[in-house]
Image (cartoon, grey):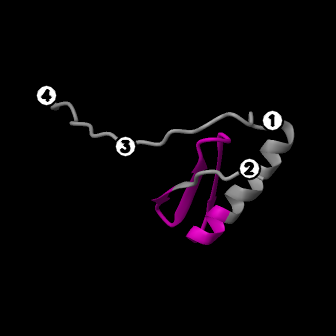
Amino acid sequence: MYTLTAVLHQEEDMYVAECPEGITVSQGRTLEEAVSNLKEATALYLEEFPLAKDRRTIITSFEVIPAART
């Protein structure tokens, strides 16, 4: 069993869910559906491409100042 990360954001009427560790992306009409679909996609991905046991993901945040438009 893996404990993975889900990053979600809304695009119009859908939620997009991304798993940075497994390099999978899915979507759904609700947050729950998006995560459920992501879990399914990630499980299928991991059948073919298992993650290394010693792999650790580091999640951080950063700020960006947009460049001025001319």
Q: Amino acid at mark 2?
A: Thr
Which residue corresponds to mark 1? 49
Q: What is the quadrant of the C terminus in the image?
A: top left
Q: State how far apart marks 1 and 3 are (Cα).
A: 27 Å
Compare residues 26 and 7 and report the one nearer the observer: 7
Which residue corresponds to mark 3? 61
Mark 2 lies on a secondary structure that is: helix
Task: Give me the residue at 58% from left, 71% from top.
Answer: 30
Please report whichever mark, 2 or 1, sits nearer to the chain's N-terminal start.
Answer: 2
Disc 2 versus disc 4: nearer the observer: 2
Which residues are drawn in magenta?
A: 8-35
Which residue corresponds to mark 4? 70
Task: Give me the residue at 17% from left, 31% from top.
Answer: 69
Instruction: Kindly check if marks 2 and 4 are in contact, taking CB atoms under 8 A apart as contact.
Output: no
Q: State how far apart marks 2 and 3 are (Cα).
A: 24 Å
Q: State how far apart marks 2 and 4 are (Cα).
A: 43 Å
Residue 10 on the magenta span: yes
